[in-house]
Image (spheres, grey):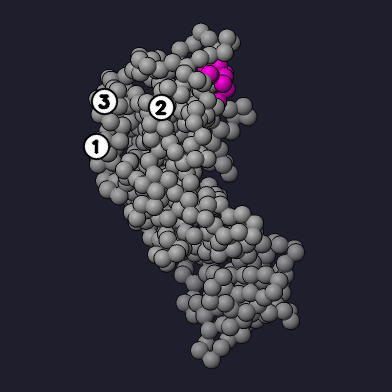
Amino acid sequence: MRVAVRPRLDHPEVRAALDLLVAWIEYRLAYWSLPSLAIAVVHDQELLWARAFGDADVERGIPATPATRYRIGSITKLFTATAVMQLRDAGALRLDDPVARHLSWFTIAREPEHDGVELTVRQLLSHTTGLPREAAFPYWETFEFPAIAELREGLARQTTALAAESQWKYSNVAVALAGEIVAAASGMPYARYVERHILEPLGMRSTLVDGIVAGDPRLARGYSRRFPRAPREQREVGDLGGLVAAGNIASTVEDLARFAMLQLRTAAGVEPAVLAATTVKEMQRMHWLEPGWQAGWGLGFRIYREDGRTCLGHGGLLPGHAADLRVLPAEKIAVIVLANAEDAWPLVYGQRATALLAPAIAAAMSGLPSTPAPDPSLSRYLGRYRNTWGDSQVLLGPAGLRIVAPFNVDPTEGMDLLTPVGPDVFRIVSSNGYGAPGELVTFELGPEGTATSFKIGEHRRYRVAEW
């Protein structure tokens, strides 16, 4: 019988990947003046690692933690899709039901060439209805969101933008309608249904579906994107009215890790938790493939190829907050990133975490002997270094020291490996011809035995406590 292997945080490959990821995130937060970011990494049914950086409230100096709540925006749509699929499995609806079968009030004008096809529940979840992206109100400018009755009235003033299933077209209106179908088919308000049938079974006790107000003290304070020569402004909204099902939820990386674990619970014979494994896989299957064959949509999920891997998930953006959730089914990995700034681009952090950790976790799972732990005395050289020309960070890799350039979009680019040649002296091993491959690095120690600078040739970089 084969014993399951679990990745350990102290595995040299995993530890080195996390150290590099942390160094890169800290650098970007400092130089992009981001208020805070929280990140969690899931492996199968385990929260492997979670950490937060920066301040949940800059003005009051409240640090972010993995338990800090952020608005997750359109990641809410995955919960709406999950609710629809639960009701489908319970026999309360079918995916190919016309929308009007469950929402008798639903009507929208159509261009002549768009007639002839009834819009279906499946099309709402796969963004192939051709409906307008937004309801007939300027809420992203005013932050005044229409109630569902107003959204219904507004539909009478709108028309379809495309013929159904002629092209993929993202629509907040479509998913708002899906939320109304959840309420109609279940006989419960959408928010109460999600709480009872998804959040409670998954143990997501810190997640809020509604009841959120602007400036809510239970959440990280939200901040605008940064404009040239101007500080960030506080930007927050309360509940989204009739658009709650499209983007209202607030959650934590720890809670969303539980939701991500559901997406990895697809093995035959696994006892259903919220959804049957076959239904989870059905949602993750491609239902609309975009031209180019590299991306498309499942039921609620964006599905795409990245660095030779299949990923699925969703992003989110609301005033003051940005979010990304990604799942790699084959690798049994998920990454969640939440931030309280509109220009944080959580997707970039998810991409980098995946690129660094996927191979490291695979190495830890291989069962092969790991390299011996590096000499603990090397810790005297670790840290941040700077001169007027640039910044470097010295980290421990799986087999020894390395110097990284944290300003790079990919911090492994131009990374120098250091091999010892004498006391406090190392030779650079690198494929970066613009750097200094083959040259010597000399660390200069202070009275406490810790490096205060390093020198390559006659040029020094000096240790700094923070970026």
Tell whether 341 sits left or right of 100.
right
Tell whether 385 sits left or right of 248.
right
- Badge 2 amino acid: Glu
Q: Please check the rendered image and state whether residue 33 is part of the magenta-colored stretch, yes or no.
A: no
Q: Looking at the picture, how far across and down is residue 217, in whole percent? A: 34, 55
Tell whether 286 sits left or right of 215.
right
Relative depth, front residue between 239 and 142: 142
Q: Dots 2 and 1: beta carbons under 8 Å? A: no
Q: Residue 186 carries which label?
A: 3
Disc 1: which residue = 196
Relative depth, front residue between 215 and 441: 215
Which image quarter holds the C terminus?
Answer: bottom right
Q: Dots 3 and 1: beta carbons under 8 Å? A: no
Relative depth, front residue between 84 and 114: 114
Which residue is at 56% across, 21% downward?
A: 161
Q: Earlier in the sequence, mark 3 or mark 2?
A: 2
Q: Please check the rendered image and state whether residue 160 is part of the magenta-colored stretch, yes or no.
A: yes
- Badge 3 amino acid: Ser
Occupied quadrant, residue 111? top right
Disc 2: which residue = 150
Magenta part of the chain: 159-168
Q: Looking at the picture, how far across and down is residue 144, in whole percent? A: 44, 38
